[in-house]
Image (cartoon, rainbow, N blue to C red):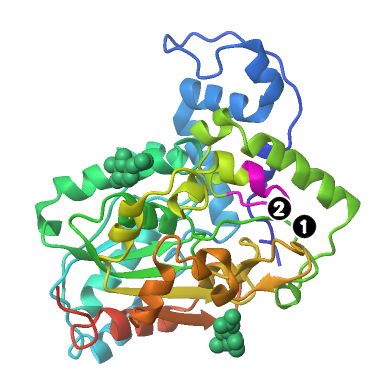
Amino acid sequence: MMRKSFSSTLLILLISFPTVITTSRNEEPRLCHSPELYDDFPMLCQMLDRLREDGDALADEITAWAAEHQLLVGEGWDMTNAKQLETTLSSSATSKLPVVFAHGMGDSCFNSGFQNLVKHTSTLLNDVYSVCIPTGKDKSEDTTNGYLLNMDASVDVFAEGIKADTMLKDGFHAIGLSQGNNVIRGYITRYNEPSVNTFISINGVNAGTGALPNCFPSVDNENGGKKVGSVCSLLTEQASKRAYSDFYQQHNFQANYWRDPNHQDEYRKFSQLARWNNEGEPFNQSYKDNFLKTKKFVWVRATKDGMVWPSEGEHWGAADPAAPLKHILPRNETEWYITDSFGLKTAEEAGKNHYISFEGDHLQFSMEDYTDWVNKYLGDSESVTM
Ligand SMILES: *[C@@H]1O[C@H](CO)[C@@H](O)[C@H](O)[C@H]1NC(C)=O
Ligand SMILES: *[C@@H]1O[C@H](CO)[C@@H](O)[C@H](O)[C@H]1NC(C)=O
């Protein structure tokens, strides 16, 4: 299989080598404004410079990389087959509420594949209004922001997009792909007004990821994970050293959900994800109240996910702090569940949580699977009225 890595870009970003400062004709101030930053974060600084100098070329590279690694959802879909699925189901399924999408890493609302997905969903639900809300103004910015705009800032842009769309003013359903789920989950946590009725999280990184490409601990047998060798441990340590810094949290989306179980104190101190989960300080009751405004959650896991570790996190499981690389806790034994830090347990007890899985790698679900989920969880007969 070609596509094994969480993201070779993430790997490159987090584990990198020193570089020289080059001069630029661009007038905007550099985000890396001191030689120390280039020493500490060479590859991130290089990427931020490239964004400033030629963002379009960088976006094109990211898109090509994502295509090669099958991260562009809907790109390979056979729309003739879609027609058949739509004909079979659209008569039975309707939704009063519109559907909002957030795309994954490397993808963009402006890609034709993603537009297939949005269109197909609308047709399945009897032509309900469906829209992908980007976190950048055009394809180029929407693509690069998936790396270089942090999670909180991405959520703010997304929330503005929601507010600006009057079709969404009475609430909506939301479907996220991969890290797009962090955008929706962040919206639910920090805003949720207008509120998300049903959230379908497909291979979400909501519980973070704690291992690098090809460095999945062997505990994760289902994923055919590699043993933790000395090289992996070394690389992971370097990744954590960089991710748990103010500068990385400020400028890199992936660092915001980097959850290394061997560096829990740093994670709690720096990570944006830790704050949303109320794992860090300060505790924010409104995060929990907002989360519970959503009526239904559908957490979809890929059992052989090669990008998110542990993949049990897609169902809110987590590495056991007592034996991080040896044991994965089921969600009901995690600290966030037991203490109900952000509302997961309350949601569970209210019957709001649905957990489903498909056999396969990250985002490699079939069009039939997807059609099923939409029909089952977003059709009005199933969905909860507001
Ligand atoms: C808690 O979250 C709300 C909503 O995002 C925010 O307005 C408020 O400032 C937060 N409070 C603290 C103490 O961080
Ligand atoms: C968690 O759930 C599993 C499966 O439903 C159950 O067997 C186990 O006893 C639960 N653990 C706790 C601590 O409730």
Residue 379: horizontal and vertical position, in percent? 23, 83
Residue 324: horizontal and vertical position, in percent? 74, 62
Residue occupying the point 43% across, 51% down: 276
Identity of the residue furthest to the right in this view: 230
Verify whether residue 259 appears in magenta: yes
- Relative to 231, is 190 on the left or the right? left
In the image, which residues are magenta?
258-266
Residue occupying the point 56% across, 39% down: 270
Quarter placement of the N terminus: bottom right
Vertical relation: 197 (above or below) 18: below
Secondary structure state at the residue bearing disc 1:
loop
Tell me whether circle 1 and circle 2 mark residues in contact (CB < 8 Å): yes
Q: Is mark 2 within 8 Å of ligand 2?
A: no
Amino acid at pointer 1: Cys
Q: Is mark 1 within 8 Å of ligand 2?
A: no
Nearer to the camera, 72 or 152: 152
Q: Is residue 51 visible?
A: yes
Residue occupying the point 46% across, 80% down: 355
Residue 280: horizontal and vertical position, in percent? 52, 47
Verify whether residue 268 appears in magenta: no
Ligand 1 is found in the corner quadrant, namely top left
- Relative to 349, is 272 on the left or the right? right
- Relative to 35, is 296 on the left or the right? left
Residue 372: horizontal and vertical position, in percent? 37, 85
Query: How crowded is the residue under tag 1: few (<14 C-alpha within 10 Å), some, or many (20+)?
Result: many
Circle 1 is placed at which residue position? 215
Amino acid at pointer 2: Leu
Secondary structure state at the residue bearing disc 2:
loop
Report the magenta stretch's main SS: loop
Circle 2 is placed at which residue position? 212
Residue occupying the point 87% across, 49% down: 231
